[in-house]
């Protein structure tokens, strides 16, 4: 695995190394499992992110800026953040998923200058490599592996696709439905901005949440707590490799 030298990659690197060592049954060198490189060394994925932004995300970034400039979103206000999470995160998640699915259906052209490069359709190459004369290089992890079980216990019932605690999300979605709105939006309306359902729903929910928070009634609407950096500390040798990598910039 390869990444840039962002501070968020230390835990990723340590988890990847630990699982590879669990499979190998022995301690492995860091470089055998993970490479740190510069952002320029990752120019392929950087270009992909740029394409994703242009095709799927820029219009939502611009809309967020409009909300803020119009005084309809203030990050310090809990009601604004909760309403934004409920209305707009599903839209943005769908936009990303659609872009990925479309991209993975495109064919990678042959590279005459590199005979090791793999060509074909990513979706087929990844899920059905045998159909194209390739093989799956991923390694299966035993679900009862001690290292994996320890991490599962650490994250508990955390849902990667959830963006709010269940009780808060359920209350907000029920409030949208009671106001005549769907609980989820796709952002595909073509009316002027003021007429878009997601705009009306956001303003409505924002006001409903504000009133509920002011009333002090149950349920208490909350966000997920930000995890502490001390909750999951990478091993010392992984931290040392990361430190040395950044010293060599």
Image (cartoon, helix red, strand yellow):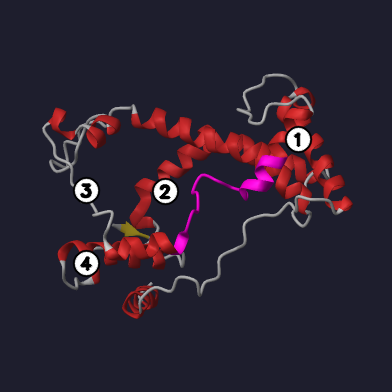
Q: Disc 4 vs disc 2: which is toward the camera?
A: 4
Residue placed most toward the observer, 203 or 37: 203
Q: CA distance from mark 4 to mark 2?
A: 29 Å
Question: Horizontally, is 49 left or right of 143 in the view?
Answer: right
Residue 172, quarter of the rendered image = top right
Q: Position of residue 107 (x, y in %)?
A: 28, 28
Identify the mark nearer the N-term, 4 or 3.
4
Name the residue rendered at 52%, 39% in the picture.
53
Residue bearing the label numbered 1: 175
Q: CA distance from mark 2 to mark 1?
A: 40 Å
Residue bearing the label numbered 2: 46
Question: In the displayed image of the protein, which residue is found farthest to the top?
Answer: 191
Name the secondary structure under disc 1. Answer: helix
Question: Horizontally, is 232 left or right of 26 in the view?
Answer: right
Name the secondary structure under disc 4. Answer: helix
Name the residue rendered at 19%, 73% in the picture.
27
Identify the mark nearer the N-term, 2 or 1.
2
Q: Which residues are magenta?
A: 154-171
Question: Which label is found at residue 146?
Answer: none
Name the secondary structure under disc 3. Answer: loop
Question: Horizontally, is 61 left or right of 243 in the view?
Answer: right
Identify the mark nearer the N-term, 4 or 1.
4
Q: Is residue 38 magenta?
A: no
Residue 28, quarter of the rendered image = bottom left
Q: Disc 2 vs disc 1: which is toward the camera?
A: 1
Q: CA distance from mark 4 to mark 3?
A: 15 Å
Name the residue rendered at 42%, 62% in the picture.
153
């Amino acid at each position: 695995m390869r990444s840039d030298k962002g501070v968020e990659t230390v835990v990723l690197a340590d988890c990847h190394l630990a699982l590879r060592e669990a499979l190998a049954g022995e301690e492995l060198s860091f470089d055998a499992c993970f490479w740190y490189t510069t952002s320029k060394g990752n120019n392929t994925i950087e270009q992909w992110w740029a394409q994703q932004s242009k095709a799927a995300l820029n219009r939502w970034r611009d809309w967020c800026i409009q909300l803020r400039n119009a005084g309809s979103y203030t990050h310090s206000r809990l009601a604004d953040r909760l309403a934004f999470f409920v209305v707009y995160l599903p839209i943005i998640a769908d936009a990303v998923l659609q872009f990925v699915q479309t991209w993975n259906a495109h064919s990678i052209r042959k590279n005459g200058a590199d005979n090791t490069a793999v060509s074909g359709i990513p979706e087929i190459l990844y899920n059905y490599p045998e159909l194209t004369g390739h093989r799956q290089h991923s390694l299966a992890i035993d679900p009862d592996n001690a290292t994996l079980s320890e991490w599962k216990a650490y994250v508990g019932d955390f849902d990667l696709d959830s963006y709010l605690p269940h009780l808060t999300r359920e209350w907000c979605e029920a409030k949208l439905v009671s106001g005549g709105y769907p609980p989820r939006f796709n952002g595909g309306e073509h009316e002027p901005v003021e007429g878009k359902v997601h705009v009306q729903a956001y303003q409505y929910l924002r006001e409903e949440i504000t009133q509920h928070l002011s009333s002090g009634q149950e349920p208490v609407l909350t966000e997920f707590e930000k995890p502490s950096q001390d909750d999951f500390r990478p091993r010392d040798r992984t931290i040392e490799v990361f430190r040395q990598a950044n010293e060599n910039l």
